[in-house]
Image: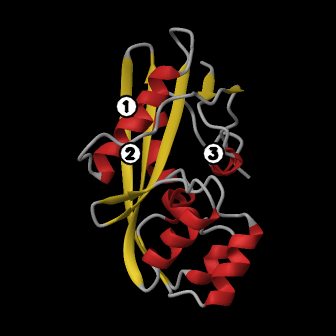
Amino acid sequence: MRLILGSASPRRRELLAQLGVVPDAVTPPEIDETPRRGELPRPYCVRLAMEKARAVAAGPDDLVLCADTTVALGRRILGKPADAAEAAAFLVALGARRHQVITAVALRRGDRIWQRDSVSAVRMKRLSDGELNAYLASGEWQGKAGGYAIQGLAGAFIPWISGSFTGIVGLPLAETAALLQAAGYPVFRGAA
């Protein structure tokens, strides 16, 4: 049974390796990630993970694993910032407030899709102008939901989380392992 990872994220490959899983192929899908009018963060995130899983070409017995991570400030979806100004606006809005990080995982074989999601609460400290400008200059915000990556420099801005650290990074391992096992895919076989 082949496993295709529908993600270009090196972090997701690293997280899968913690389960002893190495994908046979990496095929990131191209889909429109624009939220629908009035769409709430969790249903939006689940929809994207499922659409990604359906968009990856695969044989009938291949497994396709896809995920989507969304940062939500209340009902507002904070996606990947278009530029440094939008990243700054996101980080200022998140400062000294709790927000949610939602990661939905979808696993497809043929027409069948298994799905799980993880919702974690995160509090980011209010950033000083120096911290904000240094973080923006690092470029780490690029391609990151909400404009930050907890596993990078922004980890110093996060004094508190409740939920799944690996879900915040981009692939909740407990949920992913359960999906793979439900589909009959062995996990932990090469884990160190």
Q: Tag 3: residue type?
A: Leu
Residue at horizontal 44%, vertical 13%? 110
Say which quarter of the image contains residue 96: bottom left
Q: Earlier in the sequence, mark 3 or mark 1?
A: 3
* Count of number-bearing discs: 3
The residue that label 1 is drawn on is: 114
As drawn, which residue projects farthest toward the front? Answer: 85
- At which x and y percent is residue 80? 54, 53
Q: Nearer the viewer, residue 82 or 145?
A: 82
- At which x and y percent is residue 141? 64, 63
Residue at horizontal 50%, vertical 88%? 126
Q: Earlier in the sequence, mark 2 or mark 1?
A: 2
Using the image, determine if residue 164 lies above or below residue 56: below
**Marks 2/3: CA–CA distance:** 20 Å
The residue that label 2 is drawn on is: 45
Residue at horizontal 44%, vertical 54%? 70
The residue that label 3 is drawn on is: 16
Q: Nearer the viewer, residue 50 or 146?
A: 146
Relative to 45, 95 lies left or right: right
Density class for disc 1 (Cα within 10 Å; few <14, some 14-19, many ≥20) is some
- At which x and y percent is residue 22? 70, 36
Q: Earlier in the sequence, mark 2 or mark 3?
A: 3
Q: Which mark, residue 6?
A: none
